[in-house]
Image: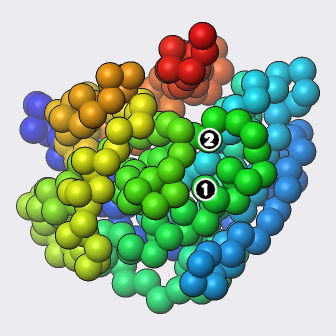
């Protein structure tokens, strides 16, 4: 039975961890009750990244800022409903699309790649933009493949803390797991050779969120990295890869997930 749960989790991951950019948005912040800004953020190599920044209502504002670095499929609109729940609890959230995704500049993408080094460069540009715009602690909320970009980006453009949902400890191991279970050949970019070194520099506080049935980015993986910072924590939920927001729902969508972020932030930064 345990093997079946791992297999089902990996089958879900076939969608999540296979680059599948989609240009059309399924929703926009204009359909929400929150103020937002749409800005084109320029990368160092000249790509324009489309971004949405959503602001909480004044009565709930916590003076906390998160950058969403999603996985490798769809575009930022696919995560808008979850972001709205986080904004409704007082966070300002900066969303963006990697090059080749959504309304960001076009970029040639081969779907058999696990990720592209350029996605970390995109996140670096968004971190720099966010640090200049907001005088707050800056956190990156990274999902699955987005955790690879978050690790690589912090080595160049530091930020204050990481919320890592489905953390990738070793891209080579992810490729092996995908190839074994899915009979699918997945390739890594040249920069994957530097990932191990970048991971040793991940000394900022990290909240690892992981499913107890996630056979792709496992709880053991997160626990291996947790000791890099004494303030890092691992929060487990019952479910598979990237199912935490739904699995940790209480009275409203994602309540337990957001509670975990709040508790982690308060313990790490509030005196």
Crowding at mark 2 (Cα within 10 Å: few <14, some 14-19, many 20+): some
Q: Residue 193's spot in the image, x, y percent?
A: 20, 70
Dot 1 crowding, Cα within 10 Å, few <14, some 14–19, many 20+ = many
Q: Quadrant of residue 26?
A: bottom right
Mark 2, secondary structure of its residue: strand
Q: Which mark is residue 155?
A: none
Q: Secondary structure at mark 1?
A: helix
Marks counted in the figure total: 2
The alpha-carbon separation of the residues under discs 1 and 2 comes to 8 Å
Q: Residue at x 14, y 57 (%)?
A: 173
* On screen, residue 43 above or below 55: below
- Contact (CB < 8 A) between labels 1 and 2? yes
Q: Which residue is mark 2?
A: 138
Residue that carries the numbered disc 1 in the rendered image: 127
Residue 101 visible within the image:
yes
96 left or right of 198? right
Q: Position of residue 87 (x, y in %)?
A: 73, 34
**Whether residue 31 is visible:** no
């Amino acid at each position: 039975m345990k093997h079946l749960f791992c297999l089902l989790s990996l089958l879900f991951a076939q969608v999540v961890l296979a680059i599948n950019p989609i240009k059309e948005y399924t929703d926009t912040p204009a359909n929400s009750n929150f103020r937002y800004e749409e800005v084109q953020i320029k990368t160092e190599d000249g790509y324009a990244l489309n971004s949405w920044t959503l602001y909480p209502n004044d009565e709930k504002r916590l003076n906390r800022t998160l950058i969403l670095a999603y996985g490798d499929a769809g575009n930022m609109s696919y995560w808008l409903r979850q972001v709205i729940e986080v904004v409704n609890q007082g966070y300002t959230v900066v969303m963006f699309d990697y090059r080749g995704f959504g309304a960001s500049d076009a970029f040639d993408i081969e779907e058999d790649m696990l990720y592209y080094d350029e996605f970390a460069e995109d996140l670096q540009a968004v971190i720099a933009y966010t640090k200049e715009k907001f005088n707050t602690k800056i956190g990156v909320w990274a999902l699955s493949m987005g955790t690879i970009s978050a690790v690589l980006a912090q080595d160049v453009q530091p930020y204050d803390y990481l919320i890592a949902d489905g953390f990738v400890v070793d891209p080579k191991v992810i490729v092996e797991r995908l190839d074994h279970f899915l009979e699918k050949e997945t390739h890594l970019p040249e920069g994957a050779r530097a990932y191990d070194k970048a991971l040793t520099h991940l000394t900022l506080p990290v909240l690892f969120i992981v499913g107890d049935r996630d056979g792709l980015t496992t709880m053991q993986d997160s626990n291996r990295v947790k000791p890099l910072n004494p303030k890092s924590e691992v929060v487990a939920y019952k479910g598979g890869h990237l199912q935490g927001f739904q699995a940790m729902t209480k009275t409203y969508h994602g309540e337990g997930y957001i509670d975990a972020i709040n508790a982690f932030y308060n313990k790490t930064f509030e005196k």
